[in-house]
Amino acid sequence: GLPTDTVSSDNAVMVTRGQRWPLMIDPEEQAKTWIKRTFKSTLDVVRITNPNMLRSLENCVRIGKPFLIEDIGEFLDPALEPILAKAIFEQSGRRLIRIGDSDVDYDDNFKLFLTTKMPNPHYLPEVCIKVTIINFM
């Protein structure tokens, strides 16, 4: 797991209890390792550069699996916008969210985690208001 210091404990609380999805500054990959151990076999892990990322994301949203996107840069893919905003809507009694050009059933068990290895990223305010930035350095 994580080190037992106060900062790591506080970070873990923000990751698991925050209102917005966490973007973890994690050059030593402590947070990524902790997330992988915490969610073991249920976690889907994808690099931001994977061309099938959105398809994997849709699947995790639909069935309520945790999803980790690794190696986030300083800019976020615009296709993530509805997920980051938690733009869930109801239609015909179903809870849906738009991902790309399709509406996907939203399972409340879905969790999203974002990590970057960059030790000192400079995120624009537009990014900062969409996620909870947590520094694991």
Image (spheres, grey):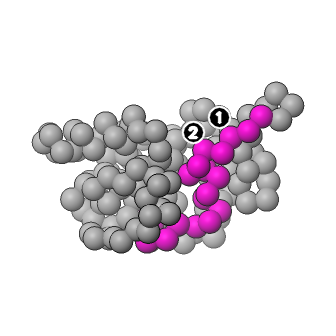
Residue 39 inside the magenta-drawn segment: no
**In the foreground, 96 or 70:** 96
Can you give x and y, in whole percent of width and height, for residue 68 in the image?
48, 53
Residues under labels 2 and 1: Cα distance?
6 Å
Can you give x and y, in whole percent of width and height, for residue 51 in the image?
63, 70
Q: Residue at x 27, y 69 (%)?
A: 119
Inspect the image, locate mark 1, and give the three-letter code of the amino acid beneath it: Asp
Under circle 1, the secondary element is loop
Residue 43 appears anywhere in the view: no
**In the foreground, 41 or 76:** 76
- On the image, numbered disc 2 is attached to which residue? 110
Can you give x and y, in whole percent of width and height, for residue 116 in the image?
38, 64
Under circle 2, the secondary element is loop
**In the foreground, 42 or 75:** 75
Residue 81 appears anywhere in the view: yes
Q: Residue furthest top?
A: 93
Q: Residue at x 58, y 67 (%)?
A: 77
Looking at the rendered image, the quarter that the N terminus falls into is top left
Other residues around mark 1 within 10 Å, as few (<14) / some (14–19) / many (≥20): some
Range drawn in magenta: 70-90
- On the image, numbered disc 1 is attached to which residue? 107
